[in-house]
């Protein structure tokens, strides 16, 4: 058993907390904050367009009369702004272009039945209509697909009918008009130069996990940029992120209002993306880490260093025979990790499934939309994790560790590398940090085992609460106990 220095433990947990928070996000403006005076008229027009869709038209289910009225009203507003709307792909898919149309901005017209869809997606439509009135861009298409909620039917038809070449930049607006403006959909087509271009011209939050999912699981993309991305276009999705990264009125009857500062922020970002020279970067494995763009060479350097150190610890272990003893230690560390994971997972499950907490609004929405049980897991995540980590730390202290903590981290990185380098990067970084202390090998697990991250994973259907305990298996490297190789006696 190896004692845990209290100062180092405090530092490790603090560093993990910073990682779990994704580094400081720019604070969202309060909903009642006054917009800048110069933007007041534009904001008033956007709010009027939102009111038209939400109050005058109401719910706009795919194939219904209200959706058809929305398409006709959008076409009339585009015509009044001096654009020439036409139909592309489907009878209600409205498109208007200027110039060569190398950029395409999209906002779907429909909503699910039973909701007027202010955030999903009247805010996006209103922002594009205001962009039509105010932009000076001469190389832009504005598209309004129908039937997005029915499975991206309108945008799929639009992408299939789009004449070659495809737009060089496709931006979908969905779930905007609330929270902090963020970006997802930055898949394999995006490289470091492109990401820096995006940050320069449209300051948006780009959570690391979003970039990983967009690269490793492009099939999870659920907005109108996806059909164009599937055909090879550089595409992205702008959305708002509320507390905990979710919109708890998603597909609910009270999705009937937007936040004025979020509308203003969205329009400013669109103006920047509409006028800036298009990015010319090449696809690579650059990563977004908080406000920074980590270049691809740094990603590959960390991966290479971790894999080489893992190989070194396999062939030249700090103690024992090469290969055989490191593999035996690896197995022992895995058994210790399995035991600690089981205990920690039980503690988390007891808090999130016992029904001791009242389900929150977000949890009830997730229950309705995703079919998750409303057991109180949203509120129970924090005490459950506290109990789980306490149990894990006690077992880690009692069981101790043996062998290299870098070796299991390198193995996890190698397995993840088969999927995507950015999925492997956190494990590689943890393997390097674990040279200082094995507990730092638990940082990838600490990043994911954070209340906001767990809620967001569950809300979007990526990891139901019943599977949260499995994430403790990622603490495997922390059950090593690296010792420096003894120097040979010179005598």
Image: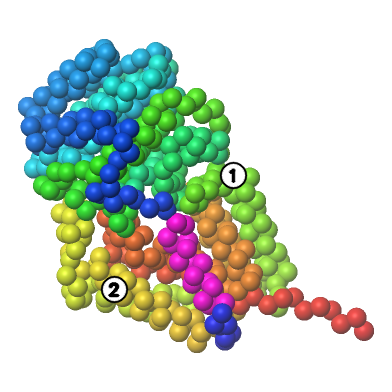
Q: How is the image coloured?
A: rainbow
**Would you place residue 66 above or below residue 400 in this image?**
above
Residue plotted at (60% across, 69% down):
434
Q: Quadrant of residue 453?
A: bottom left
Q: Is residue 233 visible?
A: no
Q: Nearer the viewer, residue 250 or 127?
A: 127
Q: How many neighbours does mark 2 have within 10 angstroms: few (below 14), some (14-19), or many (20 or more)?
A: many
**Would you place residue 179 above or below residue 382 in this image?**
above
313 vs 187, left or right, is right
Helix, strand, or loop for circle 2?
A: helix
140 vs 248, left or right, is right
Q: Quadrant of the C terminus?
A: bottom right
Q: Which residue is mark 1?
A: 295
Residue plotted at (41% across, 43% down):
204
Q: Nearer the viewer, residue 363 or 176?
A: 176
Magenta stretch in the rendered image: 8-24
Q: Residue furthest right?
A: 491
Q: Disc number at residue 349?
A: 2
Residue plotted at (51% across, 29% down):
279
Q: Quadrant of the N terminus?
A: bottom right
Q: How many callouts does the rendering have?
A: 2
Q: Nearer the viewer, residue 83 or 244?
A: 83
């Amino acid at each position: 058993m190896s004692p845990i220095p209290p100062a180092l433990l405090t530092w490790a947990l603090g560093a993990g907390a910073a990682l779990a928070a994704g580094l400081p996000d720019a604070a969202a403006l309060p909903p009642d904050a006054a917009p800048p005076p110069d933007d007041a008229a534009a904001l008033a027009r956007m709010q009027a367009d939102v009111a038209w869709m939400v109050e005058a038209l109401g719910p706009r289910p795919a194939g219904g009369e209200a959706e058809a009225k929305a398409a006709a009203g959008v076409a009339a507003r585009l015509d009044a702004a001096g654009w020439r709307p036409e139909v592309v792909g489907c009878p209600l898919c409205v498109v208007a272009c200027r110039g060569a149309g190398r950029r395409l901005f999209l906002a779907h017209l429909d909503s699910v039945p039973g909701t007027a869809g202010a955030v999903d997606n009247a805010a996006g439509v209103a922002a594009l209509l205001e962009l039509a009135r105010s932009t000076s861009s001469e190389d832009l298409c504005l598209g309004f697909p129908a039937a997005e909620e029915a499975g991206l039917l309108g945008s799929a038809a639009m992408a299939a009918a789009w004449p070659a070449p495809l737009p060089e930049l496709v931006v979908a607006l969905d779930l905007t008009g609330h929270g902090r403006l963020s970006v997802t959909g930055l898949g394999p087509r995006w490289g470091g130069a492109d990401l820096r271009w995006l940050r320069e011209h449209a300051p948006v939050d780009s959570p690391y996990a979003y970039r990983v999912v967009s690269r490793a699981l492009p099939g999870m993309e659920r907005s109108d940029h996806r059909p164009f991305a599937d055909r090879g276009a550089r595409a992205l999705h702008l959305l708002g992120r509320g507390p905990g990264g979710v919109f708890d009125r998603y597909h609910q009857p009270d999705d009937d209002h937007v936040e004025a500062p979020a509308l203003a922020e969205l329009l400013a970002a669109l103006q920047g993306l509409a006028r800036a020279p298009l990015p010319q970067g090449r696809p690579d494995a650059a990563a977004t880490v908080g406000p920074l763009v980590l270049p691809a060479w740094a990603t590959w350097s960390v991966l290479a260093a971790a894999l080489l150190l893992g190989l070194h610890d396999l062939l030249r272990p700090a103690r024992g025979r090469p290969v055989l003893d490191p593999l035996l230690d690896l197995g022992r560390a895995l058994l210790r990790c399995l035991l600690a994971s089981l205990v920690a997972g039980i503690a988390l499950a007891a808090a999130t499934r016992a029904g001791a907490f009242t389900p929150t609004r977000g949890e009830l929405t997730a229950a309705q939309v995703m079919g998750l049980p409303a057991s109180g897991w949203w509120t129970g995540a924090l005490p459950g994790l506290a109990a789980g980590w306490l149990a894990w730390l006690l077992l880690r202290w009692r069981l101790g560790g043996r062998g290299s903590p870098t070796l299991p981290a390198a193995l996890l990185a190698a397995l993840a590398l088969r999927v995507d380098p950015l999925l492997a990067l956190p494990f590689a970084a943890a393997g390097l940090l674990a040279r200082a202390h094995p507990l730092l090998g638990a940082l990838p697990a600490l990043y994911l085992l954070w209340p906001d991250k767990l809620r967001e994973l569950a809300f979007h259907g990526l990891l139901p609460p019943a599977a949260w305990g499995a994430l403790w298996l990622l603490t495997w490297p922390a059950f090593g106990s690296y010792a420096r190789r003894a120097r040979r006696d010179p005598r």
